[in-house]
Image (spheres, rainbow, N blue to C red):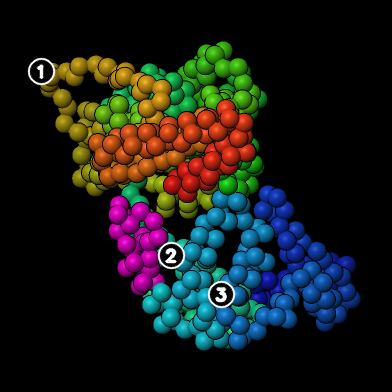
């Protein structure tokens, strides 16, 4: 067996015409697909020499300023800016930069690259776990989550792998580090009764079609919000998923999906098609779910996230994430006999392994079905009369539940802001007045209870109304620049508060 070339060195192979071809990745396009260049030669040695020159001309060779005695912070910054950042999406870049520039470099940046040890990294991870949190320590404690520790470790290990490849260090000190066990967050499910109440409440609040489509297809949040009416063929029921929407640097961005597997088509059931066809008559936009606040724009993912929690609360359902609805679709499809290969294609997974390992939840129904099959195969037991749930049948005198009545609650008056529950122990209050420059500048406060949040919001509204009044007074006196400066200052402060 031939010697395997190091990652990043390119590939060399013998062509059918007898010549040797060398190929190397020199960058990535807007869709994160590799851009390659190749060289040809009559011999393998000549091909390797040409490939080396090609890599150097394309900037693959490390800068002469890089050496083993440089600081780890300098190397990490160089690795991120030159090797990692060019092929990352804006949202992914934000995660990398948060780990690198807010956690890793402040703690390990001054250590020499050649002297960085496994003990240094192990102490860094322990400190992160104990007191590494930078914001909202009053709500979450001083330590970061296991996921954040793993995120920092992944960036460090990948950067040091590259340093080994470039000959700056001999071994990777991150290879032997001990990390917290990776325990994926448990998915939450809505029962059948909760789903009924949820959809009834969603209809009351104007989000029925969106969440019905989600429960029937399991699309990612960015995918379902980026749908346009041209993506749907009403006659055949074929829906094309070919874009996604996400927020980056405070702006909504619509782009192609991250992977080729996410570019797919699915067939919608007739009942859902009839609902969407009726809904289409009410929507005057190319977007299937347009933003009510901005012309020719899809719904903001953050708006949908907050609205989901409000609907769940009003319907008396447990708190679930939008992604849990996708998980619910996958598990329901498996329970009803859909094969994993088909399901993987519908959900846009790269492989069936992802579908099985990440999204499959062994529900009580699946356990009971498996037990029933074992009984029939081994003990020759007859299946129960009610194969649906495998549970004891309800007696005829069981009390019937009263039909669910959707919550219609009172609407907050204009000028009183809004209050949203972020999680079980964190509430957000937001006030968004219009300033003399015509723009809406928002500011938020946070509290551990709804009552405390309302009190803080009342004080925030009082302060902001006074600031807006002062800006209007300056504008009326002709001091427009001072008024705009005041508005800009408050906007910046509001952005930091958020």
SS class, disc 2: helix
Q: Which of the two labelled residues, at mark 2 and mark 1, occupies the earlier sequence position?
A: 2
Are dots 2 and 3 in contact, CB under 8 Å? no
Residue 135 falls inside the magenta stretch: yes
Label 1 Cα crowd, 10 Å radius (few <14 / some 14-19 / many 20+):
few
**Labels 3 & 1 near each other (Cβ < 8 A):** no
Q: Residue at x 27, y 17 (%)?
A: 405
Residue located beneath label 1 in the image: 397
Reading the image, the residue beneath label 2 is: 150
Q: CA distance from mark 2 to mark 1?
A: 55 Å
Of the numbered discs in the image, which one, if any, rests on residue 73?
3
- Range shown magenta: 125-145
C-alpha distance separating marks 2 and 3: 19 Å
Q: Is residue 181 magenta?
A: no
Percent across and percent down for residue 385 are 22, 28
Closest to the camera, between mark 3 and mark 1, is 3
Rendering coords of residue 470 (x, y %): 49, 34
Front-most of residues 437 and 277: 437
Q: Farthest left residue?
A: 397
**Do residues under tags 2 and 1 come within 8 Å of each other at their CB atoms?**
no
């Amino acid at each position: 067996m031939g010697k395997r070339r190091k990652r990043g060195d390119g590939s060399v192979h013998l062509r059918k015409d007898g010549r040797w071809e060398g190929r190397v990745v020199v960058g990535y396009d807007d869709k994160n697909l590799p851009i390659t260049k190749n060289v040809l030669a009559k011999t393998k040695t000549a091909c390797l020499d040409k490939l080396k020159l090609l890599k150097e001309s394309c900037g693959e060779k490390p800068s002469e300023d890089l050496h083993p005695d440089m600081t780890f912070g300098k190397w990490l910054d160089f690795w991120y800016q030159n090797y990692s950042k060019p092929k990352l999406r804006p949202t992914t870049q934000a995660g990398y930069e948060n780990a690198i520039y807010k956690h890793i470099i402040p703690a390990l940046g001054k250590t020499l690259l050649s002297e960085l040890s496994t003990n240094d990294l192990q102490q860094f991870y322990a400190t992160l776990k104990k007191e590494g949190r930078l914001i909202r320590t009053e709500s979450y404690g001083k330590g970061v989550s296991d996921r954040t520790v793993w995120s920092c470790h992944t960036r460090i290990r990948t950067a040091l792998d590259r340093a080994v490849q470039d000959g700056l260090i001999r071994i990777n000190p991150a290879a032997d580090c001990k990390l917290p066990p990776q325990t994926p967050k448990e998915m939450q499910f809505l029962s059948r009764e909760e789903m009924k109440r949820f959809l009834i409440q969603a209809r009351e609040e104007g989000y029925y079609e969106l969440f019905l489509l989600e429960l029937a297809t399991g699309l990612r949040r960015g995918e379902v919000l980026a749908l346009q009416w041209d993506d749907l063929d009403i006659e055949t029921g074929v829906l094309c998923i070919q874009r996604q929407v996400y927020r980056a640097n405070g702006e909504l961005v619509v782009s192609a999906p991250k992977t080729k597997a996410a570019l797919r088509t699915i067939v919608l059931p007739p009942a859902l098609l009839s609902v969407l066809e009726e809904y289409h008559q009410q929507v005057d936009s190319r977007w299937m779910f347009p933003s009510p606040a901005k012309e020719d724009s899809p719904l903001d993912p953050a708006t949908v996230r907050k609205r989901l929690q409000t609907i769940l609360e009003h319907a008396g359902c447990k708190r679930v994430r939008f992604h849990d609805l996708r998980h619910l679709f996958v598990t329901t499809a498996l329970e009803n006999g859909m094969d994993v290969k088909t399901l993987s294609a519908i959900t846009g997974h790269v492989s069936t392994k992802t579908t099985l390992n990440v999204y499959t939840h062994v529900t009580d129904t699946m356990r009971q079905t498996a037990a029933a099959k074992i009984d029939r195969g081994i003990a020759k037991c007859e299946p129960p009369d009610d194969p649906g749930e495998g549970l004891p049948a309800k007696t005829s005198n069981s009390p019937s539940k009263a039909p669910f009545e959707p919550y219609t609650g009172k609407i907050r008056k204009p000028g009183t802001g809004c209050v949203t529950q972020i999680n079980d122990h964190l509430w957000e209050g937001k006030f968004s007045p219009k300033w003399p420059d015509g723009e809406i500048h928002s500011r938020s406060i946070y509290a551990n209870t709804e009552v405390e949040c309302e009190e803080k919001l009342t004080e925030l509204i009082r302060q902001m109304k006074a600031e807006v009044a002062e800006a209007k007074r300056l504008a009326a006196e002709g001091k427009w620049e001072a008024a705009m400066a005041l508005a800009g200052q408050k906007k910046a402060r509001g952005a930091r508060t958020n």
